[in-house]
Amino acid sequence: MIIGYARVSTQDQNPELQVDALEKAGAEQVFQEKFTGTLRERPELSQCLRMLRQGDVLVVWKLDRLNQSLKELTVVTQAMNDSGIGFKSLT
């Protein structure tokens, strides 16, 4: 299953561009969040990561939509890789 995650940084921004791109990439479900990347608590991302199973693929529009720091991005993608979950960034 392909699952998408879209995040915008402010309440004024619209995730529509990201959601459209994720759906065109085959995402069957898209989790959306409006939070700054500096916040640690992101409930939609947490739910998304808990839902992923071996053989699934998480797709994001851009790498910085998943995590702001390279260290956090590496930890998350390594954990997914260890569990047999794929990862794809569209840009």
Image (cartoon, grey):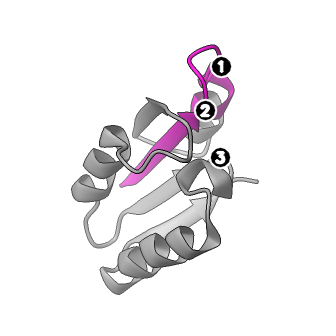
Give residue 78's position: percent from left, percent from top: 45, 81
Q: In the depicted view, which residue is nearer to us: 34 or 39?
A: 39
Residue 17 among magenta residues: yes
| Mark 2 Cα-neighbour bin, 10 Å: few <14, some 14–19, many ≥20 | some
Q: Which residue is mark 3?
A: 61
Sequence-first disc among 1 and 3: 1
Is 34 drawn above or below residue 1 in the view shown?
Answer: above
Give residue 19's position: percent from left, percent from top: 57, 30
| Mark 1 Cα-neighbour bin, 10 Å: few <14, some 14–19, many ≥20 | few
Is 86 drawn above or below residue 58 in the view shown?
Answer: below
Give the structural element (helix, strand or loop) at label 1: loop
- The amino acid type of the residue labelled 1 equals Gln
Sequence-first disc among 2 and 3: 2
- Residue at the spot 68% in from the left edge and 51% down from the top edge: 62
Tell me if 91 is positioned left or right of 21 in this view.
right
Q: In the depicted view, which residue is nearer to us: 84 or 69?
A: 69
Q: Which residue is mark 1?
A: 13
- The amino acid type of the residue labelled 2 equals Ser
Separation of residues labelled 2 and 1 (CA atoms): 7 Å
Separation of residues labelled 2 and 3 (CA atoms): 14 Å
- Residue at the spot 55% in from the left edge and 57% down from the top edge: 67
- Residue at the spot 29% in from the left edge and 59% down from the top edge: 52
Of the residues tagged 2 and 3, which is closer to the observer? 2
* Highlighted range, magenta: 1-19
Residue 76 among magenta residues: no
Is label 2 in contact with label 1 (beta carbons under 8 Å)? yes
Q: Which residue is mark 2?
A: 9
Give the structural element (helix, strand or loop) at label 2: loop
